[in-house]
């Protein structure tokens, strides 16, 4: 089951530039939360803080707290944290030299799982959850990059699910995909919600409206408004949110 | 920003204003027909109803086009949905005007009384419609809220019309049919005003996303 995340007074820098300015936010378990906002508003930085990727870049700094399962993520080993917090990126990035099967179990293997039967079971379960099993079950030994863009992205989701995370971060997971592949990913996100807490960064307003239970609007490193998606897209409280979602700025 | 959406919304405002002018022209024509009891004119106005129906379709088509191509949200969406509802109200108002022309076809003999309050009801109801459409165009809540008081005035006039007609019908049972028909006309105008309050309720919905009943 997914976990609740509590973000408290989160601030982040790239060198001298403060990209997050005191974010306070509760992210509900087993919900899809969409993060929207114009380019440079800090939304990608925000999700990269949640799996502690932001701090891996030189010159970056983070202060504040992110509480997961009652414990600050900054008190946890980053590698262990990333087992709990999976991430899917904008561009599908299967390992090019690996087969479909090897791609899915790559993370599990790194975590020490060597038993072949277990790995096969994990691969099948993950590919089924990513709604890809039926399409690839007869060619698991083919290269991961032999798949279409939409299939590659679902392969990356399967790879993230294989390590049994509780939180799934998605940074514009469908922006490089055609409408049919996008529909597959969106349906998948809706299904995964039952077992995971999902945060999705998207520039596509309609996508946020379609799939997210709650939506957070970021602007200039600040969280302007966070509420039920139905409210944000029908009656936002802040004029800046209204101006953004109606396309009048940004 | 959103030039196409803004232009589409402007088209909707213009279409609704033009539709309102057509409803006004038809109601005034039907009222004139009632006063003169001119059945030929009544037939003419009944045929004019098609123009209002055409406007309603134009508004619907523009709304559907904007929703499909612009994917409006929040206030933009409320404004477009409200335009569809307002066009339905205006279409019904047109039907009520035509119902008056249909009454003219049935009335036998001269009018049983000089019509004073019924034309006044029509004028007040039309003023409400104009006010509602202006409130929609400029998104003016105050203008919309004022429709509640105007609707009360029309309701009072309707009660007076019915009371006066009852007195006449009691004294002169031979004019019962016409008395009933004129009471129907009062009812149609009262309903016309109610539809005008619906326009105001849509304006409030656009501005606040909340519902308010202007017709209590």
Image (cartoon, rainbow, N blue to C red):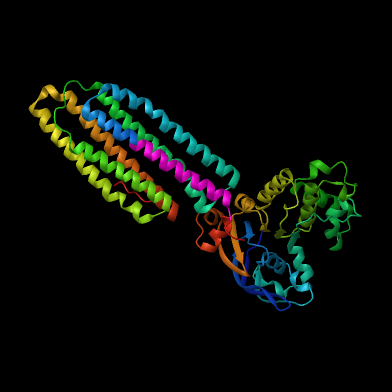
Q: Quadrant of the N terminus of chain A?
A: bottom right
Going by the image, does B77 lie left or right of A174? left
Residue B73 inside the magenta-drawn segment: no
Residue A224 rendering spot, x and y as whole percentages: 56, 66
**Viewer can see residue B74:** yes
Can I make out residue A1 in this image? no
State whether the magenta stretch is mostly helix, strand or loop: helix
Q: Is A237 placed left or right of A218 in the picture?
A: left
Q: Where B66 sits versus A34, above or below?
A: above
Residue A102, image x, y percentages: 88, 53
Q: Quadrant of residue A72?
A: bottom right
Give percent across and percent down for residue A100.
86, 50
- Tell me if residue B3 is in the magenta stretch: yes
B123 or B96, which is in the foreground? B123
Whether residue A212 sits left or right of residue B152 in the image: it is: right
Return the residue nearer the eye: A123 or B3: B3
- Quadrant in which residue B107 is drawn: top left
Residue A192: percent from the left, percent from the top? 68, 51
Q: Is A97 left or right of B82, judged from the image as shown?
A: right
| Front one among A146 and B41 | B41
Q: Residue at x 10, y 32 (%)?
A: B167
Identify the residue shown where x is 33% and y is 38%. Answer: B24
Magenta region: B1-24
Query: Residue at 14% across / 30% down in the picture?
Result: B113
């Amino acid at each position: 089951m997914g976990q609740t995340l509590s973000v408290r007074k989160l601030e982040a820098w790239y060198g001298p530039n403060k990209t997050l300015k005191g974010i306070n936010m509760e992210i509900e378990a087993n919900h899809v939360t969409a993060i929207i906002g114009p380019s440079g508003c800090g939304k990608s930085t925000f999700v990269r803080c949640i799996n502690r990727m932001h701090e891996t870049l030189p010159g970056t700094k983070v202060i504040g707290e992110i509480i997961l399962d009652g414990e600050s993520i900054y008190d946890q080993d980053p590698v262990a944290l990333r087992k709990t917090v999976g991430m899917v990126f904008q561009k599908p990035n299967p390992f090019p030299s690996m087969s479909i099967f090897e791609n899915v179990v790559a993370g599990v293997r790194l975590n020490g799982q060597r038993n072949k039967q277990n790995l096969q079971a994990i691969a099948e379960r993950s590919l089924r959850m990513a709604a890809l099993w039926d399409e690839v079950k007869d060619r698991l030994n083919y290269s991961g990059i032999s798949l279409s863009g939409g299939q590659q992205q679902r392969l990356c989701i399967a790879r993230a699910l294989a390590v049994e995370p509780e939180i799934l971060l998605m940074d514009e997971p469908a922006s490089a995909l055609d409408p049919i592949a996008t529909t597959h990913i969106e349906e998948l996100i809706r299904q995964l919600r039952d077992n995971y807490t999902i945060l999705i960064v998207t520039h596509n307003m309609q996508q946020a409206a379609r799939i997210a239970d709650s939506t957070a609007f970021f602007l200039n490193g600040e969280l302007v408004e966070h509420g039920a998606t139905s409210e944000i897209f029908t009656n936002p409280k802040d004029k800046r949110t209204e101006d953004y979602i109606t396309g009048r700025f940004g | 920003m959103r030039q196409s959406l803004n232009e589409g919304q402007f088209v909707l405002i213009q279409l609704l204003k033009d539709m309102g002018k057509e409803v006004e022209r038809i109601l005034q024509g039907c009222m004139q027909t009632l006063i003169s009891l001119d059945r030929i004119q009544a037939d003419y106005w009944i045929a004019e109803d098609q123009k209002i129906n055409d406007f309603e379709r134009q508004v619907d088509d523009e709304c559907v086009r904007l929703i499909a191509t612009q994917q409006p949200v929040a206030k933009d969406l409320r404004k477009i949905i409200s335009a569809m509802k307002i066009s339905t109200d205006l279409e019904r108002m047109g039907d009520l005007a035509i119902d008056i022309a249909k009454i003219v076809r049935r009335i036998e003999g001269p009018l049983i009384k000089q019509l004073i309050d019924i034309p006044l009801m029509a004028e007040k109801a039309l003023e409400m419609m104009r006010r509602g459409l202006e409130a929609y165009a400029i998104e003016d809540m105050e203008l919309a809220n004022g429709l509640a008081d105007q609707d009360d005035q029309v309701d009072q006039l309707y009660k007076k019309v019915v009371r006066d007609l009852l007195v006449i019908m009691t004294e002169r049972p031979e004019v019962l049919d016409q008395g009933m028909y004129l009471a129907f006309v009062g009812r149609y105008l009262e309903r016309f005003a109610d539809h005008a309050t619906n326009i105001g309720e849509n304006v409030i919905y656009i501005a606040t996303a909340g519902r308010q009943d202007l017709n209590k």
